[in-house]
Image (spheres, rainbow, N blue to C red):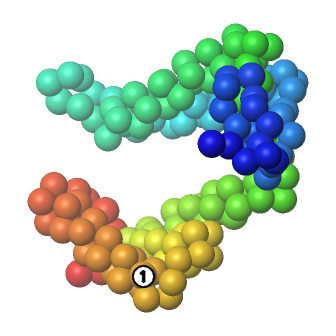
């Protein structure tokens, strides 16, 4: 049973009082353009790495596939921008996304210098503790376990040549 403060939405679901106002078609279109630009830029970088062939994939194969998919999704978003109304206006809570992206940029900047173990643990801790507001204990344990698992997977099992300390 719904509470008296809930107002049904068009989809028959209760409206969320804390949800930011909906964004308009212009915001949808700007978002789509940013997604296409990001995908196209990443695709260019992936192609410069070399994609190889299906029998012998190059280092740019997966980045090229992901960035091509991102570009296609951005084009589809642009094509449907006028019909969509589920995006929200940018608010202060949206700054968390900018902080998360900034922390990833910092991670990429230092991983080549000091290896991936310390930056991966710090990034995971930051995301859990600061952005996710998890407890200190949970953040430390998950950060360390995840870093060990990533090391075991990429360095140990897959023998990926990434900068690492050990």
* Local SS, label 1: helix
Residue 42 at least partly seen:
yes
Q: Residue at x 51, y 63 (%)?
A: 108
Within-10-Å neighbours for mark 1: few <14, some 14–19, many 20+: few
Residue 82 location, x and y as percent? 80, 14
- Position of residue 157 relative to residue 7, above or below, is below
Q: Residue furthest bottom?
A: 137
State which quarter of the image contains the N terminus: top right
Quarter residue 159 falls in? bottom left
Q: Residue at x 55, y 18 (%)?
A: 72
User: Which residue is nearer to you in this view: 7 or 121?
Assistant: 7
Residue 86 location, x and y as percent? 72, 29
Residue 117 at least partly seen:
no
User: Which residue is nearer to you in this view: 71 or 64?
Assistant: 71
Q: Residue at x 53, y 77 (%)?
A: 134
State which quarter of the image contains the C terminus: bottom left
- Position of residue 67 relative to residue 116, above or below, is above
Residue 103 horizontal side relative to residue 86, left or right: left
Quarter residue 88 falls in? top right
- Position of residue 6 relative to residue 131, above or below, is above
Q: Residue at x 67, y 26 (%)?
A: 12
- Circle 1 residue: 138
């Amino acid at each position: 049973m719904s509470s008296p403060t809930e107002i049904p939405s068009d989809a028959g679901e209760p409206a969320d009082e804390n949800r930011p106002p909906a964004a308009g078609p212009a915001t949808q279109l700007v978002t789509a353009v940013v997604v296409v630009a990001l995908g196209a830029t990443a695709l260019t970088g992936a192609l410069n790495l070399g994609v190889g062939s299906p029998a012998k994939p190059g280092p740019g194969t997966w980045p090229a596939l992901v960035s091509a998919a991102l570009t296609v999704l951005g084009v589809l978003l642009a094509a449907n921008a006028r019909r969509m109304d589920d995006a929200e206006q940018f608010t202060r809570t949206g700054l968390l996304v900018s902080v998360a992206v900034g922390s990833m940029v910092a991670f990429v900047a230092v991983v080549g210098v000091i290896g991936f173990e310390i930056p991966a643990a710090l990034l995971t801790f930051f995301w859990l503790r600061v952005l996710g507001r998890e407890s200190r204990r949970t953040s430390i344990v998950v950060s360390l376990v995840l870093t060990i698992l990533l090391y075991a997977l990429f360095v140990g099992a897959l023998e990926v040549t990434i900068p690492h300390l050990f």
